[in-house]
Image (spheres, rainbow, N blue to C red):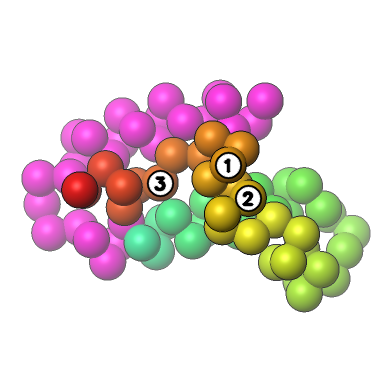
Amino acid sequence: MVIASINPVIRGWGNYFKEGTVKKRFEELDGYVRARLRSFRAKKRTWKVILYTLPKPELERMGLVSLSSLLK
């Protein structure tokens, strides 16, 4: 439900700013969004457990839109 609610914001923001030289910044923001989703999912677990609980491919399978994918 959280991913479904933030995807339109990510997509809109990415489409607005993708004309500039933003590849590195988009990659940084993608990492930040993934980290926040992991934190939201498992508040009381250690970082190692959180990182391996929701790897990037798993978040993509869940439908998370990546800012970097909008540049292609």
| Element type at mark 2 | helix
Describe residue 7's horizontal placement relative to residue 38 as left or right: left
Could you tell me which residue is drawn at 89 percent across and 59 percent down? 44
| Element type at mark 1 | helix
Residue ID for mark 3: 66
Could you tell me which residue is drawn at 64 percent across and 60 percent down? 55
Residue ID for mark 2: 58
Does the magenta portion include 6? yes
Location of residue 4 with respect to 29 vertically, above or below: above
Does the magenta portion include 16? yes
Location of residue 37 with respect to 22 vertically, above or below: above
Residue 61: assigned label = 1
Could you tell me which residue is drawn at 31 percent across and 52 percent down? 68
Q: Which residues are magenta?
A: 1-26
Q: Residues within 10 Å of mark 3 (few under 14, many from 20)?
A: many
Secondary structure character of the magenta stretch overall = helix
Mark nearest the camera among 3 and 2 is 2
Identified by mark 3, the residue type is Ser
Tags 2 and 1 touching, CB below 8 Å: yes
Tags 1 and 3 touching, CB below 8 Å: no
Identified by mark 2, the residue type is Glu
Q: CA distance from mark 3 to mark 2?
A: 13 Å
Q: Quadrant of residue 9?
A: top left
Q: Earlier in the sequence, mark 1 or mark 3?
A: 1
Q: Residues within 10 Å of mark 1 (few under 14, many from 20)?
A: few
Describe residue 15's horizontal placement relative to residue 9 as left or right: left
- Give the camera-side residue of 46 and 55: 55
